Amino acid sequence: MRMRDKPRQARQIRSRHLRLLVLSLTTLIAISLLSRLPAWSLLELRSFDYLSTVDDPRPPPGGPVIVAIDEPSLADINAQWPWPRSLHAQLVTQLRAAGARVIGLDIILAEPSTPENDNAITNAVGPDVVLAGDETLIETPQATQLIRVTPLQQLTEAGAKTGIASVDLSGDGTFRRIPAYEDGFAATLAKASGTISATLPAGQLVQSFGPARSYPTVSYYQALDPAHLLPPDYFKGRVVLVGLSLQNAPVIDKGGVDAFATPYTVHTGTLTSGVEIQATIYDNIRRGLSIEEARLPMAAACILISVLLAAATVWRSTGWLTIVTSAAALLAFAAISFAGIRLAHIFVSPLGPTVAYISVVFGQAAFDYAEERRNKRQIIRAFAQYISPDLVKRLSSDPTQLKLGGERRTLSVLFSDVRGFTTIAETLKDDPEQLTGLINRLLTPLSDVVMDHGGTIDKYMGDCIMAFWNAPLDEPDHALHAVKASLAMQSAISTLNRELEREATQRGGRPHVLKMGVGINTGECIVGNMGSTRRFDYSCLGDSVNLASRLEGASKNYGVALLLGEETARLVAGTYTVVELDRIIVKGRTVPSPVYTVVHDADAEALAAHRAFTQAKYAGTLAPSDPAFDRLAADIPELAGYYAIMRDALAGSGEE
């Protein structure tokens, strides 16, 4: 049986590996298609948000200082917005005097105001001042129009530089990328300060430095009088950005003026001011901190490696270890992606490898679960007719307890047979329906008893039942359960006889009285699937099985309903009173085998007398006239038939 199972197991393994290969290829194709969807790109960018901010990086040293047009400034200046340009001119003058290296005004000065104010700001600006411009793409059904707004010409003629302050937002409205403007506001600031030498990393991902108000920030009114309101040399040698920056960062669901969502918004739910975003872009350019997205070959290679790793994880099987390994793998993907951001300034999205790994591992786990369920159903179907529902449940919960090939086990085997059933069948030969009904009424309660006591029904042979204990599941007290079942079977026969007697009385006929003999033997057997390749049964073979069958047949020769083998009697002696009846040589064996039965109403004196009786019988000193026959029949009524048979046997042999 085991030799035949090996090719079957090999086919199952090949089938599983083929299924895993198909699953892996399907996963690769599916991810290649999904990655083309805009939603996929947004999910990748959201993973970047978490990874690029997980260690809460702070602004690099020596970065910009922000002069905020904020609530305290609005209250202190007490002027209607927009403020007069002469005030901005005063600010520029104060910042330059305080040692600011470059001043960036993130304020649009595109429309003329009063000549006095315009002249004031014109006189204040110079090559160290960068003024904000704006670029807007307007799409209508008729046309697409790009509108570029720049500062007043007189300001640029005075030496001020123009920087486009527009930013690029992702599909979810979050700022993440270096704007693709050679004359961008932050890029122009970097050029003016003399800190830029490399090509503008347009389109690369921006490394954020904390939530709103993470950069050094002072209020506008403080910068108007730095000598009295700020520490000495606060602006000396620094790049200064001026713009709207509210102290209370606006929340994302309410929006804000010149405020945008950044990667930190996933943690704080607040927006960051435009002027602080320009400071972030400036530091990314100045320090070379922007992050390049991995190109397609690298991303595809990572996904392929993930699929191969997942296939290796579930190559043999899936289980609790698979969950632990999967959790470690997913953490590793995130850690590798984080390390790429921090060490190489390359973002390799963990989304593709993670989805690929989960798809393969949990897809294969689903296949294995379905296969396990199918195997359980097969086991249940195969054994539901032979063993109790509780045993079927245990077997289906742990199929490893079942060996479908033949195996050597110690079993307690029971044979039961109805005495005189051939005569009953002859009586009912003209009424096959009644005979069939009687057989079913007989076998149903007997089978229920066997299964209720944890036995496995091997087969039915007419009115005979063969059953065994301790297979397919281990049962330490198998002999005890077998004997308990035999006694319960006798009770079931008595109940059926009462029903038959009552029915016969109602019909005015004679009842069929059923009597049963049972033989039980315990010993080593071969148990497993027996039969042909087309049809087989779960059965057992061996000398112990043959002896159990012989004991059932011999039980009627001793006037008892139950006959036990020597090992069975030894195993149940602690629970039941067992008495030896004889030593017999059954067909096919040359060594005498002691046989026993169970008695319920016998005291110690009667049992001692019975042992003396059997010893005298073995020694040949027992005579038919011995008073022990009558005395023991009275003391142990259950064995009265046995003593009568033994006396008749001695009388028939002519012994006196």
Image (cartoon, rainbow, N blue to C red):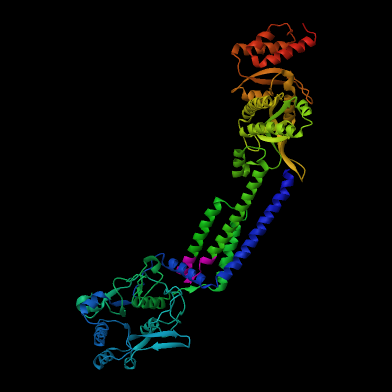
Tell me residue 582's x, y (percent): 72, 17
Res. 299 image quadrant:
bottom right
Tell me residue 600's x, y (percent): 61, 19
Foreground: 31 or 389? 389
48 to the left or right of 527: left
Foreground: 417 or 203? 417
Tell me the quarter of the image containing the N terminus.
Answer: top right
Res. 298 image quadrant:
bottom right
Is residue 507 placed above or below 345 in the rendered structure?
above
State whether residue 618 appears in this view. no
Question: Residue at the location (48% across, 86% down)?
Answer: 141
Tell me residue 480's x, y (percent): 62, 27
Foreground: 387 or 65? 387
Q: Main secondary structure of the magenta part?
A: helix
Question: Residue at the location (72% across, 47% down)?
Answer: 5
Magenta stretch, residue numbers: 337-352
Is residue 275 placed above or below 152 in the rendered structure?
above
Magenta stretch holds residue 348: yes
604 to the left or right of 160: right
468 to the left or right of 130: right
Tell me residue 409's x, y (percent): 68, 34
State whether residue 78 appears in this view. yes
Is residue 453 placed above or below 318 in the rendered structure?
above
Res. 490 image quadrant:
top right
Instruction: Please count the marks in the image.
Output: 0
Tell me the quarter of the image containing the C terminus.
Answer: top right
Question: Residue at the location (62% across, 61% down)?
Answer: 23
